[in-house]
Amino acid sequence: MKKILLLLLVAHISLAQKPGGIEFKTTPINSVFQEARRVGKLVFVEIYSPTCHTCQSFIPTLADSRVGKVYNAKFLSTKLDIGSPATQTFLNSRRLFVPSLPLFLYFDPQQNLIHFAMSNNSTDEVIRHGTNALNPQARSQGMKARYQQGERSANFLIDYAMFGRVTKDTVANMAAMNEYARQQSAATFANQTNWLALQKLVLDYENPMFQYMLNHMDTYRKAYGAEQTLQVAENILMSSLFSGRGAQYPIAKIIQIQQDLIKIGVDTKVAHNRTLLPEVNAYFRARQTAKAAERMDNQVNSNQLSVPEYVYISRLFNRSSPDAVDAPTVVKWVNKGLALKPAPKEQADLYYELAEAYRRGGKNADAQKAAQKSMELAQATQLDTRRNVEQMGKLK
């Protein structure tokens, strides 16, 4: 298997460097941009994987002399392996998401993304994408302005939504897909095109196409298979729950997502686990501390938690709770963690959280004892004691 992958990689490099095709730089990406600034060219980046069959199929196209003529004249080009840590560092630094491979990205010399493409495999298409990247009126970079100016064609909305995904602009993606859904009739919601849109583009559980899917799951199961239908529906619900907007959902919306997870076929206990932290944080935002503590305590009582989990939930409540109503419950959780006879480092963490809970609850003497115990354990295991010193200072 390793030999086959090596041969594929060698073929990818040798064909990509075929005279007449795109001349891909092999220097680090930052060096490519430095050269681009020096010579005044844009930068074309192909995000690929040596094990991606679709990527392999593009090799002859990118090696075509017609493609090379356009790209070599106007761009400096490079290839980035999606599996490389350096590639991930670059993508993260530009806040870019790769929905599928290969992905074509076009940048100005200052590393600003100006255009993207998920191309069909043809010479004309690859040339067209490069030509669009050169045209300020056709670049993806201008889509937001075009949307604000009223452009609403279905194809444009699909492209704009995908650009929103690539650039992690969830607001733009949701606006485009909600508008797109409003343009479709319910009779077309389950067709192949809109199924692809649900798979690749819809991130909002309130999108009309997803709401239709939610209420017609059997239609999708028969057309596209039960497993894939469940996966798509689950992805949309979880994307909504853990989006930036989801972080501000009121408790009612979070409970609705929990119920929808169960509705699509997720096990009830799994669904409750999935929404646990969003529910607790929603209660915190609503200053309903008792309900947050009750929700977490139910979780504790119905599951066997590990010591790190007891540390985590105790720290969560000590840091995020809007008042001290939960303090006695946090003390109970810490003691359950200590009863598991953890290692000294974990004991130090638990006693630290125990002192915090006592302090928040107004039990200063108990807090001092727990803080002293945490300090002693930290010293014995040669841990950084700065937090302990600070905590004990607050308790004097």
Image (cartoon, grey):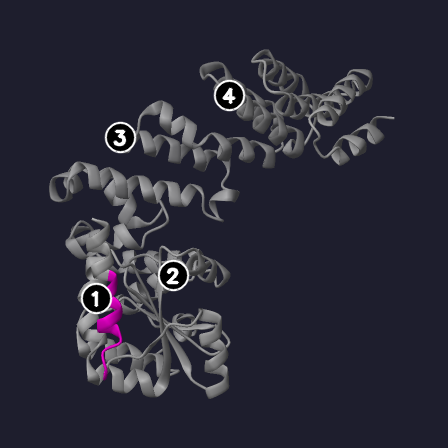
Tell me the CA gap for discs 1 and 3: 44 Å
The kind of residue tagged 4 is: Ser
Residue at the location (74% across, 34% down)?
Answer: 387
* Dominant secondary structure of the residues highlighted in magenta in the image: helix
The kind of residue tagged 3 is: Gly
Q: Residues within 10 Å of mark 4 (few under 14, many from 20)?
A: few
Tell me the CA gap for discs 4 and 3: 28 Å
The kind of residue tagged 1 is: Ala
| Residue beneath disc 4 | 306
- Decide which of tag 1 and tag 3 comes sooner along the chain: 1
Residue 169 inside the magenta-drawn segment: no
In the displayed structure, 185 sits above or below 292; it is below
Q: Which of the two residues, 109 or 286, is positioned nearer the viewer here?
A: 109
Q: Position of residue 171 (x, y in %)?
A: 44, 57
Tell me the CA gap for discs 4 and 2: 37 Å
Of marks 4 and 3, the one in the foreground: 4
In the displayed structure, 314 sits above or below 66; it is above
Q: Secondary structure at mark 3?
A: loop
Is 37 left or right of 353, judged from the image as shown? left
- Decide which of tag 4 and tag 2 comes sooner along the chain: 2
Of marks 1 and 3, the one in the foreground: 1
Instruction: Indicate the quadrant containing the C terminus: top left, top right, bottom left or bottom right.
Output: top right
- State the extent of the magenta-drawn residues as a range: 9-20
Q: Which mark is residue 166?
A: 2
Tell me the CA gap for discs 1 and 2: 28 Å
| Residue beneath disc 3 | 265
Q: Which mark is residue 11?
A: 1
